[in-house]
Image (cartoon, coloured by chain):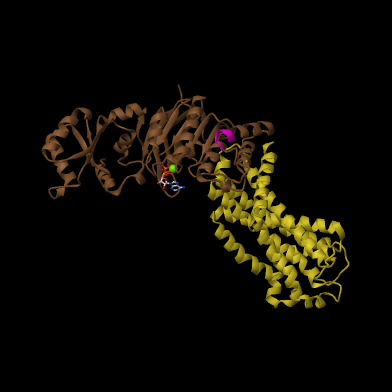
Amino acid sequence: MPGIIDVSQLVKTYGDGTKAVKGITFSVNEGEFFGFLGPNGAGKSTTIKILTTLLQKTSGFASVAGLNVDSDAAKIRKIIGVQNQDTVVDEDLTGRENLVLQGQLQQMHGPAIKERVDDLLKIVDLVDAADKRAGFYSGGMKKRLDLATTLVHNPKILFLDEPTTGLDPQSRAAIWAYLKRLNEQGITIFITTQYLEEVDRLCRRLAIVDLGEIVAQGTPGDLKQEIGADSISLGFENSSLNGGDVRTKARQVLEKKFDGVSNIVDSDIGLTVYAKNGSYMVPELVRAFDEAQIRLSTIGVSSPTLDDVFLKHTGKRIRVEEVSSANMRGMFGRRRR
Amino acid sequence: MSFFSDATHLFVRSMKKLVRNPILVFFSLFQPIIFLLLFTQLFSGLGRFLGAGILSYTAFATAGIVLQNAFSSAFQSGTAVVDDIKSGFLSKMLATPVNRSAILFGRLLSDVFRVVVQTVIILVLAYALGVYPATGAIGYLLVIFTVAFFGLAWSGISLALGLKTKSAETVFGIAGAVTFPLLFMSTALVTADFMPPWMQDVSTYNPVSIAVNAIRNPITGCNVAQRVCNIGFDWNTILQAYGVIAAIGLVTLGATLYLFRKVVS
Ligand SMILES: Nc1ncnc2c1ncn2[C@@H]1O[C@H](COP(=O)(O)OP(=O)(O)OP(=O)(O)O)[C@@H](O)[C@H]1O
Ligand SMILES: [Mg+2]
C-alpha cells in the first residue's frame, strides 16, 4: 500500500552546490504522527519545502497523497497545511485578519471562513487577543496563530517545521496536546522538532537524518531497543579524591572491573555509564566504588531514551544549548563514523 | 475565477498595512508637500518668465510635484515585496492554492491606489494655494489616470529590483540615486530655458519631462514648451507621453513578471 507521503531517492542540490539532501527514501502512512529529526543543517527544512511544493527537487521521486510534487503541485496545496520554521504572521493584521486572509487564499468563502476562524481562535486560545494586531503578540502567541493559520482549510496533512521551538513549557505542552487531538481526528502529521520526549510520546514512527541522509528510522520503541544499553547516571560527593580527579579514578574502576560497560561519558554531576542490564550492575558498582573510596551522592538507572538514539546515530546531542561545554567534549569524543 | 478574488484580498491586505502605518504615507508625502509650500515660494519669481501673468510658478510646478510623488512612491513598491520574501509571507502564500499572478497584481493595484490617493491630496493642497484646473474636472481625472499609469510603469522597476536583489536597502539606494538626477534634469520643476544646453538635450529625452508634460497640460491648459496657453487638451503631448510610459511599462513589468515567475516556481 502506498503511503500518504512517499519519498524515494530524493536529492536536492542547491544552486551554490550545497548537497542538502542526498538520496533519502521513506514513507509515511495515512494518519501517522511522523517525526523527522536531525541536527542543524541535516536537510529537514529542505525536505519539507520540497514536499510542500515550495522548492524544486534535483532528482528522485516524491508524492503527497498520491500526487506528484512536480506535476500535481496545485492539488497538493489544497490538502496540506504548512508551518514554516520561522514564524510567519502578518504583524500589521490582527490575529483574526491573519486567519481570514489565509482562509481566503485557501479559496474558502464568507460564512465558512468566519465559523472556522472563530473555532480556531478558541482552540489556540487567542479569543481575547483576536482583534489585536499580531505585531503586539508574544512569541508564543504568534507561534499559536501561525499554527492556526495552517489549519483554516481543514488540511489532510500537516507539515510542521519546529512548531514549538522557542516556546515556554506550557505553550509547548498545549500545542502538543492539540496536535495529538488533530492526529486522533485522522490528520497525518509530519513534524520536525527538537523535543525528543514529545516525539517519544506522540510520534508513531520517526526518521533521523544527518548530513542529508537517513541514518535511522522506525518506531521510538524499536530504535531505543537497538541501543541495547541502559544508562547509569552517577553523581559524586566530591570532585577530587586524594588530589586526583574523581572522574578519572571512577573511570579506572569501571574499566578495570566491568566488562558490560559499553561507554562512559562525563555529565554535570559525575558520569553517565552505558551498559547492558544496567540495573543488575548497580550493587556491584556501589561495592567497587566503596572499596576505591569513591563516594556516590546519587545513582540512577534509566532505559535508553531517544536522546541516546539520536546521539548514537548522529554523534550529536539534539539540544546542544542545554548541555554544558564540559559535557560536549565528551560527547563529540564519542562520535564514530 | 480565483484571480480576481485573490487579487482583491491581497489588495485589501496591502491597504490595511498602509493605513496602519500612516508614517509611510506621511514620509512619502512630506517631500512633495514641502516642495509645494516652500519650493514654489522660493522660485515664485520664475512665474514672470513663464508667460506674463498667465501662469504662476505654483501652477507650473504642481505637475512636477505630482510626478515626483508618483516617482518616489512607486519606487517603494519593491520594498514591500522584499518584506514579504524576507518574512516568509510569500512562501506561506505560495504553499496555498492562491493564484500566482494575483499576488503580483494585488501588489500593483495597491501601489497604484496609493499613488492616486497621494496625488489627490497634493492636488487638493495645490487648489488651496490657488492652482485651479484649467481643463476642469475631466482634466483632473486625466491627470490622475496619467499618474496611475506612470506609477504602474515605474513601480515595475522597483519590483524587478526587489525581486532580483531581495534587498530593501538596494532598492532604496538605487531609487535615491536615480530619482534626483532624473527629476532635476527634467522640466518637472523648471523650464528648459533655465538649463545649460547639454542638460536641455538630456531633458528632452528624459521620460520624466515627457510624462510631466502630459500632467502639466491639463492642469495649466498650456503647452509650456511652445509658450502657448488656453489651448485646452494638447492631445499630441499627452499621447506622446502615453507612448513613452507604455514602452517603459512594457519593459519594467515584463522584467518583473519574468523575475516573479522565477521566484514562485
Ligand atoms: N537556499 C539555500 N541555498 C544554499 N544552501 C542552503 C539553502 N538552504 C539551506 N541550505 C543548506 O542546506 C543544508 C540543509 O539545510 P536545512 O535548512 O534543510 O537544514 P535543517 O535540517 O532544516 O536544519 P535546522 O535544524 O538548522 O533547521 C544546510 O547546509 C544549509 O546551509
Ligand atoms: Mg530547518
**Which chain shows up in yellow?**
B
Q: Nearer the viewer, residue B247 or B35?
A: B35
Please state the extent of the stretch shown in magenta in the rendering: A121-125
Q: Position of residue A165 (x, y in %)?
A: 44, 42
Q: Nearer the viewer, residue B46 or A163?
A: A163
**Residue A182 falls left or right of residue A296:** right
The quadrant in which residue A125 appears is top right
Q: Main secondary structure of the magenta part?
A: helix
Residue at 60% from the left image edge and 39% from the top image edge: A128
Q: Position of residue B61 (x, y in %)?
A: 76, 69
Q: Residue furthest top?
A: A1
- Residue A293 vs A180, above or below: the answer is below
**Residue B54 falls left or right of residue B144:** right
Instruction: Check if residue B250 falls in the magenta segment.
Output: no
Q: Position of residue A30 (x, y in %)?
A: 48, 25
Q: Quadrant of ligand 2?
A: top left
- Residue B198 vs A296, above or below: the answer is below
Q: Position of residue A71 (x, y in %)?
A: 54, 34
Q: Quadrant of the C terminus of chain A?
A: top left
Q: Nearer the viewer, residue B32 or A142?
A: A142
**Residue A252 falls left or right of residue B175:** left
**Residue A302 falls left or right of residue A80:** left
**Which chain shows up in brown?**
A
